[in-house]
């Protein structure tokens, strides 16, 4: 699996969550400026993790080449890079993709009961320091989520994402 930055992971995870695999629009929580975002996208294209395709009327435009309007979509290689098995589907069907580990982490932390580091490590197959890094880096800093923690006598420190509102 290729080594990816947090920004690249957020871009690929966002695209994987969309039914059409569209990369654009980028999440507003990405703190990168337009130039840095463009460079990140160009590196993902160069590595074959995303690709250009002809834009439909509803698609956000990446660039224009003469009369051709192009947008960006995640490739099967991009899906594999974030741990999602690409599944062949008809063009009009919604893709049946496995959830990324980042999406699983968010879902576990959104539960009312929250999750401990040990529980997250076992479920995701990550080491404890990787779980803590994902919470502080990808979730808090990159996605701007509010992650609360509290001490529990039975489970140790329990983390949960604060309800929006």
Image (tube, rainbow, N blue to C red):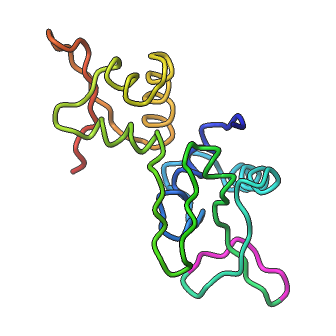
Membership of 60 in magenta stretch: yes
* Residue 20 x/y as whole percent: 53, 71
* Residue 15 x/y as whole percent: 55, 59
Residue sitting nearer the eye, 58 or 77: 77
First to last magenta residue range:
59-66
Membership of 157 in magenta stretch: no
Q: Is residue 94 left or right of residue 106?
A: right
Asked if 64 appears above or below 83 in the picture, the reply is below
Residue drawn 53% across and 57% down?
Answer: 16
Asked if 155 appears above or below 5 in the picture, the reply is above
Q: Quadrant of residue 67?
A: bottom right
Residue drawn 21% across and 19% down?
Answer: 150
Q: Quadrant of residue 110?
A: top left
Residue drawn 28% across and 26% down?
Answer: 159
Residue drawn 25% across and 38% down?
Answer: 162
Asked if 50 appears above or below 63 in the picture, the reply is above
Main SS of the magenta part reads: loop
* Residue 157 x/y as whole percent: 26, 15
Q: Is residue 1 left or right of residue 11?
A: right
* Residue 50 x/y as whole percent: 70, 59
Q: Is residue 111 left or right of residue 147?
A: left
Q: Quadrant of the N terminus?
A: top right
């Amino acid at each position: 699996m290729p080594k990816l930055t947090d920004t690249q992971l957020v871009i690929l995870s966002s695209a994987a969550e969309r039914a059409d695999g569209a990369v654009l629009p980028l999440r507003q929580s990405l703190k990168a400026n337009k130039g840095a975002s463009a460079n990140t996208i160009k590196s993902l294209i160069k590595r074959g993790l995303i690709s250009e395709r002809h834009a439909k009327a509803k698609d956000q435009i990446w660039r224009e080449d003469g009369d051709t309007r192009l947008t960006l979509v995640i490739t099967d290689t991009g899906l594999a890079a974030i741990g999602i098995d690409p599944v062949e589907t008809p063009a009009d069907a919604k893709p049946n993709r496995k959830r990324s580990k980042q999406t699983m982490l968010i879902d576990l932390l959104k539960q009312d009961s929250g999750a401990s580091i040990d529980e997250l490590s076992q479920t995701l197959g990550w080491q404890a320091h990787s779980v803590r890094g994902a919470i502080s880096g990808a979730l808090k800093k990159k996605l701007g989520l509010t992650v609360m923690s509290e001490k529990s006598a039975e489970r140790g420190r329990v983390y949960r994402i604060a309800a929006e509102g």
